[in-house]
Image (cartoon, rainbow, N blue to C red):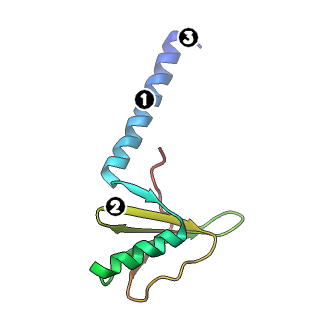
Amino acid sequence: MSAGAAAASSGAAAQRHQMMINAVRSFGPVVKIEADGFNTILARSMETEPNPLIVTASGGWFTTVYSYLTSYKGLYFYTSSSFPLTLPAQAEVIEVDKIWIPNM
């Protein structure tokens, strides 16, 4: 690989990294937790917010994966599970095609 090509490749990698950092900054802090922890967060959030917002998605190639996202005290909590979670009846649930979390 020539020096020019190596520099261009390095520059492209740096640009992709910066784009990922900007995505995280615009989205906010995301905490990935297990399904049990997600249910605990939902229970806590319902103490202050009677109708928590939960975003859900499901999909997969060979097995179905269920994904969930909610916010609590300025953080976003995300979990995925091989089985659907039981969500509170009073929660506002939004079903989407896909939940994308920036990967660092």
Q: Is residue 81 visible?
A: yes
Secondary structure of the residue carrying tag 1 is: helix
Which of the 4 quarters of the picture holds residue 90? Answer: bottom left
Left or right of 102 in this view: 80: right
Whichever of labels 1 and 2 marks the residue nearer the N terminus, that label is 1
- Residue 68: image location, x then y, percent: 48, 69
Amino acid of disc 3: Ser
Mark 3, mark 1: which one is toward the viewer? 1
Verify CB contact (< 8 Å) between mark 3 and mark 1.
no
- Residue 95: image location, x then y, percent: 46, 75
Amino acid of disc 2: Leu
Mark on residue 102?
none
Mark on residue 2?
3
Amino acid of disc 1: Ala
Q: Quadrant of the N terminus?
A: top right
Q: Which residue is mark 1?
A: 14
Q: Residues within 10 Å of mark 1 (few under 14, many from 20)?
A: few
101 and 85: which is toward the camera: 85
Q: Residues within 10 Å of mark 3 (few under 14, many from 20)?
A: few
Q: Is residue 3 above or below residue 40?
A: above
Whichever of labels 3 and 2 marks the residue nearer the N terminus, that label is 3
- Residue 101: image location, x then y, percent: 46, 55
Q: Residue at x 54, y 78 (%)?
A: 85
Mark on residue 75?
2
Left or right of 21 in this view: 1: right
- Residue 3: image location, x then y, percent: 51, 10
